Image (cartoon, rainbow, N blue to C red):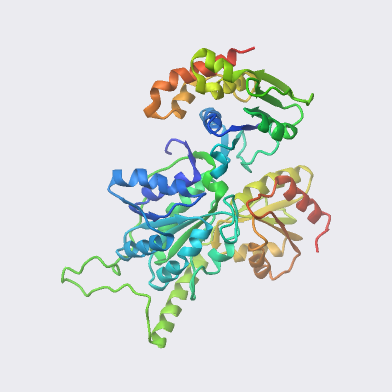
Amino acid sequence: MSTTQILIAGFGGQGVLFAGKLLAYKGLLADKQVSWLPSYGPEMRGGTANCSVIISDEPVGSPIVSNPDVLVAMNLPSLEKYEKDVVSGGIIIVDSTLIGKKVERDDVTTYYVPATKMAKDEGFATLANMILMGKLMKACDALSFDGIEATVQKVVPPKKANLIDINIKAIKTGYDFE
Amino acid sequence: MAEKVLMKGNEAIAEAAILAGCRHYFGYPITPQTEIAAYMAKKMPKIGGCFLQAESEVAAINMVYGVASTGKRVMTSSSSPGISLKAEGLSYLAGSDLPALVVNVQRGGPGLGGIQPSQADYFQATKGCGHGDYRMIVLAPSSVQEMASLTVKGFDLADKYRMTSMILADGTMGQMMEPVSLEEAVVGTYDKSWAVTGTKCERKKNIINSLSLVPEELEKLNFERFERYKAIEENEVMCEEYMMDDAEICVAAFGIAARVAKNAIVKAREEGIKVGMIRPITLWPFPKKVFEEAADKVKSFISVELSMGQMIEDIRLYTKSKKPITLCNRVGGMIPSPEQVLESIRKANEGGNE
């Protein structure tokens, strides 16, 4: 029996909500209980966006993640705002292209992934979010890489089916990043 | 069972309404319920239905009145300030005994307030939104699956009793995604002989109207309406009892508050505190009897609400204030944390209540 609470945070437009949806579907396809809760309204437009995802063996109670097991920080304000909330022993994944600052806490495991730069170098500049999700799947036991193809097929709308392969490639790039 | 898909609560309401045979939607955009209208705008034209963005909330509810008069399933949705604007129409629907579904995805108030979740429209929904003696059936979903199932239920109850059903949700319920399985609803057959559908010169004409200038007749209409309300109070109450068997403390909460409370109850149980929850699913009819009976068993109540304390008044009323009752709340778009609820439970357990 376990519950994993994930918080993904960044600017609007970085694909925060889409990344969360990927994780939620990943959980759903693995027969887990899941919830996905976005920040919404004007704060999404150009401001900060964040997304709470819970993946659990038990029915999910509150869908609000206030103390995440995993924090994915995609910009500096997000790291500064949520670093203190991560549970002791938790995981922080940082897009180190956009965040120069180091995580101050030593009771969490931190991964620095230059996702924005990697995405640009690989030729899929808008998929830094998927690179970070790949790293998350490597770092977090609750979300294995298995079945990622089926998950991406669920999340990418049929009209954009041509983007399925490139999303999988981006996730794999993040997964293989050491 | 149909395959589970991830859907926002708002979208689940819209899809469930379509599956329940609703082909007429009228609305005016407002956060945090706009996904309902967006979904309808996309879907209705493809299935021969009607989506119409009205020029205002007042216009939308009166369009609902029009379609409801023909006996067709019809709905509108809005959020708190928009529901206030619809209040007049809701009273007219009641006065004309018309079935309709109205969704309120609540946000913080009063006034324009904010756009974050709230439950402060409990009074408005359960005690009468517009003028006159009338009730609405008020359904309070606590999951995306219930957003869908209670929408279907709401249409059925509206048709059965010729009145408005309201889905009283909140911003969190509307915006969150959860797995949901949606199936074609089995629509019952309801007497629609009152509907205005054209007489074809074959029957007496039907008149839909809420004006009645003869006091004796208007009184009779009110009495008859309240006979129906009585039947609803007897037959349609829904609530969930969670860990209440041996509970000494009873948490009362609906919607998102009940989700938060569940987390707190699980933790309190780990600490050995005997606590359970009554979650009203119908806010009207209120689960009076369940609370009345609980008052003889538990030591105290805690009402968890996203308001300054509205449902707590009904709990006091129906438990006849036999046991102490405290409020655990946040307002203005804030949501109580499980820790805050847990702290209230601990205090109640120590007998630290008023």
| The quadrant where residue B207 appears | bottom left
Residue occupying the point 52% across, 17% down: A170
Do we see residue B103 in this rendering?
yes
Q: Is the residue B178 above or below the residue A120 in the image?
A: below
> Residue B341 location in percent, x, y?
73, 50
> Residue A93 location in percent, x, y?
66, 24
Left or right position of B173 against B184: right
Q: In which quadrant of the rendered image does the N terminus of chain B lie?
A: top left
| The quadrant where residue B46 appears | top left
> Residue B156 location in percent, x, y?
41, 58
Left or right position of B304 against B53: right
In this view, the residue in front, A84 or B69, is A84
**Count of marks, rendered view:** 0
| The quadrant where residue B86 appears | bottom left
Q: Residue lying farthest left?
A: B201
Q: Is the residue B8 above or below the residue A27 in the image?
A: below
Do we see residue A144 in this rendering?
no
In this view, the residue in front, A169 or B234, is A169
In this view, the residue in front, B333 or A69, is B333
Residue occupying the point 51% across, 20% down: A125
Q: Is the residue A57 above or below the residue B48 in the image?
A: above
> Residue B146 location in percent, x, y?
51, 48
Residue occupying the point 50% across, 72% down: B230
Left or right position of B127 against B305: left
